[in-house]
């Protein structure tokens, strides 16, 4: 079924009784060409591109819960490509181009809104960094506009421009950045993969990975053994645990990152705003709620919940940037488990086990990377070669020291 405005109108007239399930709920087959572990954004997009671009349709996506129950539905929905370093810059630029055509390709409304994202500068040093980042973005072919004080005051009148502790010197506007509906992205890719014959198997936890003679043979699950010619790991915050089933130790730490939303308000924040001095970022959803987040909780955890001290920390940063936020009632918070790599950049690579592929280490960038990650990972699985946009995301860089340290902070999980 193709979705269309006429179809929505017709179903409305007929009581909305003609809609069919968006995807099947099949039982697992004994063997697949490719088994993907993890039914989040990266796993679902990989399955879609395997089927759509490479004709590999004997594919299963295994999810221990329900599709989209992990970090794909537990983030602040930001989409951007304002990266600077070789590797990250090319990849996120490629991913943003896929975002811009995603709704037409999937025939699904993911509510992608290119409302613009601005990174604020609060010192001469930060403004120099933003100018350098903007130049790198423009050289990559992406958009970047360096704003001065008056530009920020004009476009963001609601922030505290007189704050003596965090004076606003200017900002870097990335107009093609914005937001998308995280759940809809998962649903759109799931629908697209299912339509092309991929089996989406929910409530199927992987309990082991079978390796014989250095070659992967399949996975053991709570629903029995499933044979596979190739196995792809897209388990996000659980990557270390799943990889350990195959005897691999990854340069990954899992941390909780909380997000928050307020009551619905009238439109007040048209852009995505990043407050570098306080590590705070905020946007306004289509329903009017202010969606924001900040730092990691700074302890290792696999729990999808946060703690109260970080609630206070993020609220303080929000109040420092825009005191008006103090008048809004916070409705709820949620936690996503981040797979934090040691240099803050992702891994898309083969492993030393033949037929076993790895996609992890997305840190804060997992949601915005979903289309590019699936495209690049599907290319690697299908061809055995690294996608040109992701050929720097190699596992071996942690052995050689050729890291991609975007923030210049070193080992991201261990900052505190």
Image: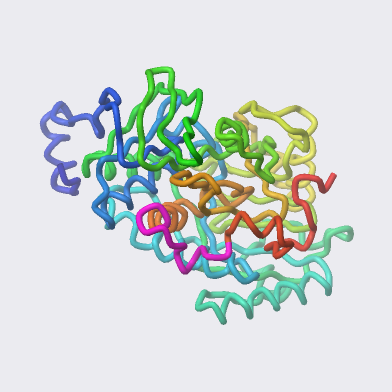
- Across and down, in percent, residue 52 comes to 26, 53
Residue farthest to the right, as pictured: 164
- Across and down, in percent, residue 354 comes to 47, 46
Q: Where, by quadrant of the figure, is residue 192 drawn?
A: top left
- Across and down, in percent, residue 369 comes to 50, 54
The answer to whether residue 153 shows anywhere in this view is yes
Is residue 246 shown left or right of residue 257?
Answer: left
Is residue 176 shown left or right of residue 227?
Answer: right
391 in magenta: yes
Task: Choose between 376 and 108: the one closer to the eye.
Answer: 376
Name the residue rendered at 25%, 44% in the picture: 57
Name the residue rendered at 52%, 54% in the picture: 349
Q: Is residue 19 above or below residue 93?
A: above
- Across and down, in percent, residue 269 comes to 58, 54
266 in magenta: no
Name the residue rendered at 60%, 29% in the picture: 331
Task: Name the quadrant of the N terminus.
Answer: top left
Range covered by the magenta-colored residues: 380-392
Task: Name the quadrant of the C terminus.
Answer: top right
Is residue 222 shown left or right of residue 189?
Answer: right
Q: Where, by quadrant of the figure, is residue 385 drawn?
A: bottom left
Is residue 272 shown left or right of residue 47?
Answer: right
Q: Is residue 279 above or below residue 301?
A: below
Task: Choose between 379 and 383: the one closer to the eye.
Answer: 383
């Amino acid at each position: 079924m193709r979705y269309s405005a006429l179809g929505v109108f017709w179903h409305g007239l007929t009581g909305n009784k003609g809609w069919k399930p968006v995807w099947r709920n099949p039982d697992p087959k004994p063997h697949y060409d490719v088994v993907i572990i993890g039914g989040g954004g990266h796993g679902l997009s990989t399955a879609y591109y395997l089927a759509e671009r490479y004709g590999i349709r004997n594919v299963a996506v295994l999810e221990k819960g329900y599709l989209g129950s992990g970090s794909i539905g537990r983030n602040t929905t930001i989409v951007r490509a304002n990266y600077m370093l070789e590797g990250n810059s090319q990849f996120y630029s490629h991913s943003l181009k896929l975002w811009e055509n995603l709704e037409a390709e999937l025939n699904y409304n993911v509510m992608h809104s290119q409302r613009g994202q601005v990174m604020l500068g609060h010192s001469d040093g930060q403004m120099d960094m933003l100018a350098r980042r903007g130049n790198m973005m423009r050289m990559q072919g992406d958009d970047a506009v360096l704003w001065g004080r008056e530009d920020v005051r004009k476009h963001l009148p609601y922030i505290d421009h007189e704050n003596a502790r965090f004076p606003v010197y200017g900002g870097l506007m990335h107009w093609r950045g914005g937001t998308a509906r995280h759940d809809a992205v998962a649903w759109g890719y799931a629908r697209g993969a299912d339509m092309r014959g991929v089996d989406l198997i929910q409530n199927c936890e992987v309990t082991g990975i079978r390796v014989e003679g250095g070659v992967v043979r399949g996975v053991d699950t709570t629903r029995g053994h499933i044979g596979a010619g190739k196995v792809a790991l897209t388990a996000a915050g659980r990557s270390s645990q799943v990889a350990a089933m195959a005897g691999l130790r990854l340069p990954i730490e899992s941390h909780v990152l909380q997000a928050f939303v307020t009551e619905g308000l009238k439109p007040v924040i048209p852009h995505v705003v990043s407050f570098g001095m306080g590590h705070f970022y905020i946007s306004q959803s289509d329903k009017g709620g202010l969606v924001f987040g900040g730092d990691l909780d700074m302890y290792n955890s696999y729990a999808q919940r946060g703690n109260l001290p970080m609630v206070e920390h993020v609220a303080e940063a929000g109040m420092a940037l825009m005191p008006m936020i103090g008048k809004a009632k916070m409705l709820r918070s949620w936690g996503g488990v981040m797979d934090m790599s040691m240099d803050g950049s992702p891994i898309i690579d083969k492993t030393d086990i033949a037929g076993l592929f790895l996609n992890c280490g997305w840190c804060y960038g997992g949601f915005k990377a979903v289309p590019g990650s699936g495209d690049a990972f599907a290319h690697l699985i299908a061809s055995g070669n690294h996608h040109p946009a992701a050929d720097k995301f190699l596992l071996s860089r942690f052995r050689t020291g050729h890291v991609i340290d975007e923030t210049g902070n070193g080992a991201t999980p261990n900052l505190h």
